[in-house]
Image (tube, rainbow, N blue to C red):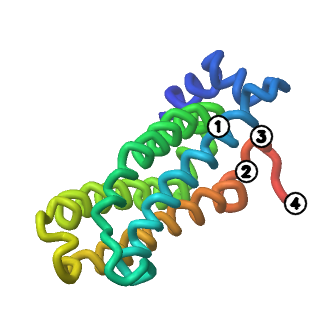
Amino acid sequence: MNHFLNALHEFPFSVWVRESSSLWAFPMFLVAHAIGMSIVAGCSAMMSLAFLGFWPRNAPVKPLERMYPVLWTGFWINAVTGVALLMADAATRLTNPDFYVKMLFVFAGVYLLRLTRSKVFADPRLDQGPLPSAAQALAWASLICWFGAILAGRLLAYVGPVSGLNGLSGK
C-alpha cells in the first residue's frame, strides 16, 4: 500500500497540484470542488425541503426533477476535482478515517438521489395528491447525508494525519 501511495504522491500531476504556486493548481481544484458540492447539496436540499413541506401549498414538485442534469453536472465536477485533490495528498487522505466517513456519506447521498428519482419522481400520480410516504424519509436521509459529507469533508483538514509534516511530532 505504501508503494501505491508513494507513487500517487510522486506522480507529476499530484506534485503540480500540491506544489505549484499557480492559481490553476490547488486553489482552482479546491474552489471547483466547493462549487460542485454546493450544486449537489443545494439541488438535493431544495428537493428534500420541498418534500418536507417547505414548498408553496399545492405547487407541483414534479418540475424539481429537471434539476437532476444540473445536479449530476455538479457531482461530476466534484468527482474530477476530488480525485485531483486526493492525488495531491493521497498518503494523508487515504490513511484518514474521516475520508472514508465522507465517502460513505457521498455514496449514500448518491444512492438516495437515485432512489428518490425512481421512487418519488417516477410516480405518475406525484402531483395529484399527497407525496408518496417514502418521500419524507428519503428527504431527511438525503439532508443528513449531504450535511455529513460536507462536515466530514471540512474536518479532513483538521482531524487525522497532517499533510506535509511527515516525521515531525508535536513534542
Residue extending farthest to the top is 12
Of callouts 1 and 4, the N-terminal one: 1
Q: Position of residue 100 (x, y in %)?
A: 47, 55
Q: Which residue is mark 4?
A: 171
Residue type at mark 4: give it. Lys
Q: Which residue is mark 3?
A: 164
Query: Depth check: 96 or 45 in front?
Result: 45
Q: Are marks 1 and 3 in contact (CB under 8 Å)?
A: no
Residue type at mark 3: give it. Gly
Residue type at mark 2: give it. Val
Q: Are marks 2 and 3 in contact (CB under 8 Å)?
A: yes
Q: Which residue is mark 1?
A: 89
> Relative to residue 130, is residue 143 drawn left or right?
right
> Relative to residue 109, is residue 88 drawn left or right?
right
**SS for dot 4:** loop
Q: Mark 1 to mark 3: distance in Å? A: 9 Å
Q: Are marks 2 and 1 in contact (CB under 8 Å)?
A: no
Q: Which residue is mark 2?
A: 162
**SS for dot 2:** loop
Q: Quadrant of residue 129?
A: bottom left
Q: Quadrant of residue 112?
A: bottom left
Q: Position of residue 26 (x, y in %)?
A: 73, 33
Q: Position of residue 122 (x, y in %)?
A: 16, 59
- The residue at the point 40 percent across, 58 percent down is 104
Give the foreground label among 2 and 4: 2
Of callouts 2 and 4, the N-terminal one: 2
